Structure formats: C-alpha cells, structure tokens
Image (spheres, rainbow, N blue to C red):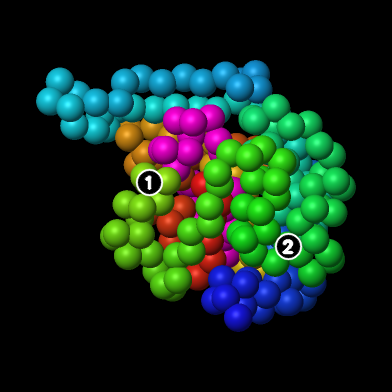
Amino acid sequence: MNSIVQRSGLSVAGLLVAGGCLAGPAATAQAAPAATAPVGSVHTDGHTDRNGRADRRAERSVGIEYQAQPNFYYCGPAATRIALSALGKALSQDEVAKRLGTTEAGTDSALDTTRVLNELTGRGYRTTEIRDSVARPEQVDRLRSDVVAALDEGRPVVANIKGTAVDTVGNPHSYEGGHYLTLVGYRDGGDLIRIADPAAPEGEYWMTLEKVANWIAERGYSS
C-alpha cells in the first residue's frame, strides 16, 4: 500500500474520536468568510533582483471564494472547493465530497485532492508527501518551490495537515485528528504562506513556511 494512503487512512480512521477536521479548541464549523480578492485576481511584486536571483520580497495572492465547512468531516471538500474557485469552478461542497469519496471518516489523502483537482481543471496538479515526522530543510525548500510555482500559475495548493501550529499573530490552530486547508498566497519569496482554513473563525491567516511544512509532515499536499 502506498505510504501516503496508509498513513492518511490510519489517521482518518480516528477522526470521529478525535473530532475529525475540527479537532482542537481553535477550530469551529461556523467560520465566517474572510474578505478575499475577486476570483482570479493576482498581485505580485517582482520575482528576481538585478542579478537574476530570487527576490525575497516577491509576493502573490490568488483570488478565491471562501466557504467554511458545514460539518466536522467536510474539510477536504471545503479546502478543495476553495482551490477550485480560483480556477473558475463553482461546484458545491457536496459535489466535491462525492468526487473525493469523503465519508464521516474524512477524506483519505492528498492523492484524492490531487485526482479531483486534475479531473476538474486539467491543470497538472501532483501529490508530494513529506514522509518524515519533522520536515527536513530540503523538504521545506521543496514546499516553497511548489507553492510559489503553483500560485504563480494561479493554482492554490491543498494541504493535508495534522497537529497544532501557530500563525504569525500568535493564534494556535489545532487539528490533532487531521485536517485539509488551502494555501492561497505567499510573501517574502515564499517564507510566509497565506492559508484559507475552512474551519478557522477568521477564515484566512498567515503562517511561516517552516511551520506549514511541519504541519504537513507525515502527510502530503496537492500542488
């Protein structure tokens, strides 16, 4: 069995006990939509310096239609739908859930989000797994490259995460049973990542790249 499926399968098997996509005190199914740019809008601030090196000031945000997940196990459909909204696909969460094979035990793995994103958009999404319990430096760098490349093409990234991480304003986000969320922007050349979280009260927030990578550890992402 593919390791990403096996690990995600074992993780989601405990979602009902752990609270599913809403494990932890920082999560709520009644998240209010955050203000977002119109679908398809993009902002960027340069990509190379005068010597042709990556410009650490570069930033980009992809316009999305944010929706909170309506129940404890729809984080996968909600996060995938947020990504699809940036690509002009306005499906319901129920339709996305059907395509993902989501049940009350959750959505199996990033392999499913990749498959559905490609089926509906044909945009060349691929699955990347961070197999270690803590992301190695090269895995952090790979995540940066993947996120920047995807967002530069207007494609949000869907990440399967687990555990607790703290955003840039100090708010913890805890999903011990596992969760899906969408990476919709970056700044400082990818050192900071903007997250659209279908279970967060504030809807969107920023987090450092390293924290995001460690949040994904032992799981995977679609980029």
Which of the two residues, 15 or 51, is positioned nearer the viewer here? Answer: 51
The boundaries of the magenta stretch are 147-175
Q: Is residue 188 above or below residue 41?
A: below
Which amino acid does the dot numbered 2 rest on? Answer: Thr
Q: Does residue 170 belong to the magenta stretch?
A: yes
Residue at 85 percent across and 46 percent down: it is 95
Tell whether position 30 is magenta: no
Say which element carries label 2. Answer: loop
166 and 47: which is toward the camera: 47
**Residue lying at 67% horizontally and 75% vertically, measured from the top left:** 9
Front-most of residues 119 and 200: 119
Q: Is residue 82 above or below residue 13?
A: above
Amino acid, disc 1? Arg
Residue topped by disc 1: 144
Viewer can see residue 186: yes
Q: Residue at x 64, y 30 (%)?
A: 86
Q: Disc number at residue 107?
A: 2
Q: Earlier in the sequence, mark 1 or mark 2?
A: 2
- Mark pair 1, 2: CA separation: 25 Å
Q: Residue furthest left?
A: 51
Badge 2 crowding class, 10 Å Cα cut-off, few under 14, some 14 to 19, many 20 or more, is: many
Image-based side of 211 in relation to 92, left or right: left
Question: Is the residue under label 2 in contact with that under label 1 (CB below 8 Å)?
Answer: no
Q: Residue drawn 80% across and 53% down?
A: 99
Q: Where's residue 72, x and y in %?
A: 80, 58
Q: How many marks?
A: 2
* Horizontal side, residue 70 vs residue 217: left or right: right
The answer to which quarter of the image holds residue 1 is bottom right
Query: Horizontal and vertical percent for residue 77?
Result: 75, 50
